Image (tube, rainbow, N blue to C red):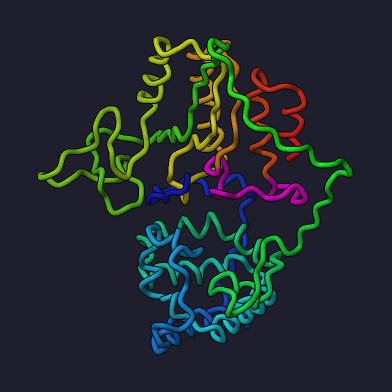
Amino acid sequence: MPRHGVTPGPGHPRSGREQRSNRSCGAPSLGLLWMALALALLDSLVLWTPAGAHPLPAQGYFASFSRAVPQLWNNFRWWNLTCPVCKSLFTVIDFGLQKETNVARVGSLAIKLCKLLKIAPPSVCQSAVQLFEDDMVEVWRRSVLSPSEACGLLLGSTCGNWDIFSSWNISLPDVPKPPPQPPNPPASGAPVSRVLFLTDLHWDRDYLEGTDPDCEDPLCCRRGSGLPPPSRPGAGYWGEYSKCDLPLRTLESLLSGLGPAGPFDMVYWTGDIPAHNVWHQSRQDQLQALTTVTALVKKYLGPVPVYPAVGNHESTPVNGFPPPFIQGNQSSRWLYEAMAKAWEPWLPAEALHTLRCT
């Protein structure tokens, strides 16, 4: 489930992606200057915009991110963004990304803005941008949203039209719809299936007892979180109800204690195995979490059928699941192949084929 990250340590690999060896530090190009100008104008122009102009709905798209990036809300004031400024901004950014081919320069600008606006601690800004910059720039370049559609998404229908269903064309089978049938509850004494539901285990391999559970980073109770002040207790042995994930011993204790609650006919396991340090993860990290926790489930649940699903945290960058037409090193094949291998004892051949070909 969505959550946030943590300050990275030195020397941690970015991801399994190929590293760029030429991170140019030369003079800024025309495209980069256009993007910098656009982002600077956004921060200044919204200051004089009337507070009631084009407000976002209370349950709008960015409202779901308010906890994660409060500084972004305070500095950019998206709810005061006028429609003309929004369309101008996205036009300029589109133009800038077409002209600026050096992703490192775009990332450098994003890091500077992240630090300037105090969106996150400086080290988090650095590692987050470096992890996400390739995907973000590539997605933006491939985006089919026009400035009008993007601003319609952000500001509502008064500023443009964005309809996620507008381009869909679904062909229904030429079969009459069957008449609805009232529910038919099982008879008294009918067989009952017992289903174990596992989700969001979020193993943090860097969990450390005694560390600060309320540190400045979005994920705490781990190496690098520091010690709590004398007035507060540190992270517990089994976990902490705070901005923390779980140590492996807690997951093992959970799984080993399921015997008395059984027997179970099947297990639904809906993913989210890795920790929430989403801007400090490599492909190797994600695969280690997958294989380690899968081995524990096999160890303690034995022959019980397990039906696993892919959570949004399984990939890196988080939520990064490119569609099948994305091939090569930018695809998710590295993850799906590993899942198929780890889950082969549980899944039929058809499901394994679907997983590998996703």
Number of disc labels: 0
| Residue 99: quarter of image | bottom right
| Residue 202: quarter of image | top left
Does the magenta segment cover residue 345? no
Q: Of helix, strand and loop, which mostly describes the magenta segment?
A: loop
Where residue 299 sits in the image (x, y, percent)? 50, 14
In the rendered image of this protein, does residue 90 appear above or below residue 114?
A: below
Depth check: 122 or 171 in front?
171
Where residue 178 sits in the image (x, y, percent)? 78, 37
In the orientation shown, which residue stands out farthest toward the left? 231
- Which residue appears at 14% of the width and 47% of the height? 229
Where residue 302 sits in the image (x, y, percent)? 54, 11
In the rendered image of this protein, does residue 34 appear above or below residue 333?
A: below
In the rendered image of this protein, does residue 305 appear above or below residue 118?
A: above
Depth check: 266 or 228 in front?
266
- Which residue appears at 63% of the width and 24% of the height? 343
- Which residue appears at 40% of the width and 62% of the height? 66
Locate residue 83 relative to residue 210 in the image: left or right. right
Q: Which residues are magenta?
A: 312-331
